[in-house]
Image (cartoon, helix red, strand yellow):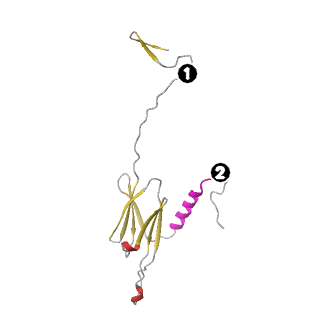
Amino acid sequence: MTTRMFASPLFLGFDHLEQMLERASKNSSDGYPPYNIEQIGPGGLRITLAVAGFTMNDLQITQEDNQLVIRGRQADDSADRVFLHRGIAARQFQRAFVLAEGIEVTGASLDNGLLHVDLARPQPETRVKTIPINRPAGNGVGNGTAKVVDGSISRD
């Protein structure tokens, strides 16, 4: 039986939030592969995963809506070999990260068994808009317009 967190009628429209939380809890239960998240610069982030033994052809990075999914699957070539001891497991993995609104994936690289995925949060343009302040009409003071008559200012 599934327990819904947002079953109350007060939480209409929060289904996507519940789905995000469910996906995050499912994906965080497995600790493989280990990863770091670091800040690089004022608007940049980097996710680094330890994927020793994986090649670029074994790895796949996709962005599904606001979720970054990293998958790894090694080809099983052990049929030709006889192992006396097998301590290095060749297993597949899937790691998912929920991205905040506006985060963009800018690139990925594989270097010495570390997969680096670079993210950026574009800085929004600062727009300044001046809002004029007007007096309401009919308040007994006039309509707020000034007139220049013979060098002196008089208000209506």
Q: Secondary structure at mark 2?
A: helix
Q: Main secondary structure of the magenta part?
A: helix
Please rate how many residues cluster around mark 1, counting C-alpha atoms within 10 Å: few if below 14, some from 14 to 19, many from 20: few
User: Would residue 69 be seen by someone viewing this image from the given angle?
Assistant: yes
Q: Residue at x 67, y 53 (%)?
A: 9
Amino acid under disc 2 = Leu
Give the CA distance from mark 1 to mark 2.
42 Å
Please rate how many residues cluster around mark 2, counting C-alpha atoms within 10 Å: few if below 14, some from 14 to 19, many from 20: few
Q: Quadrant of residue 104?
A: bottom left
| Proximity of marks 1 and 2: CB atoms separated by less than 8 Å | no
Residue numbers of the magenta segment: 10-27
Residue closest to the eye, 53 or 141: 141
Residue located beneath label 1 in the image: 137
Residue 23 sits inside the magenta stretch: yes
Is residue 137 found left or right of 105 in the rendered image? right
| Residue 156 screen position, x and y as percent | 50, 14
Residue closest to the eye, 143 or 100: 143
| Residue 84 screen position, x and y as percent | 40, 90
Q: Quadrant of residue 150?
A: top left
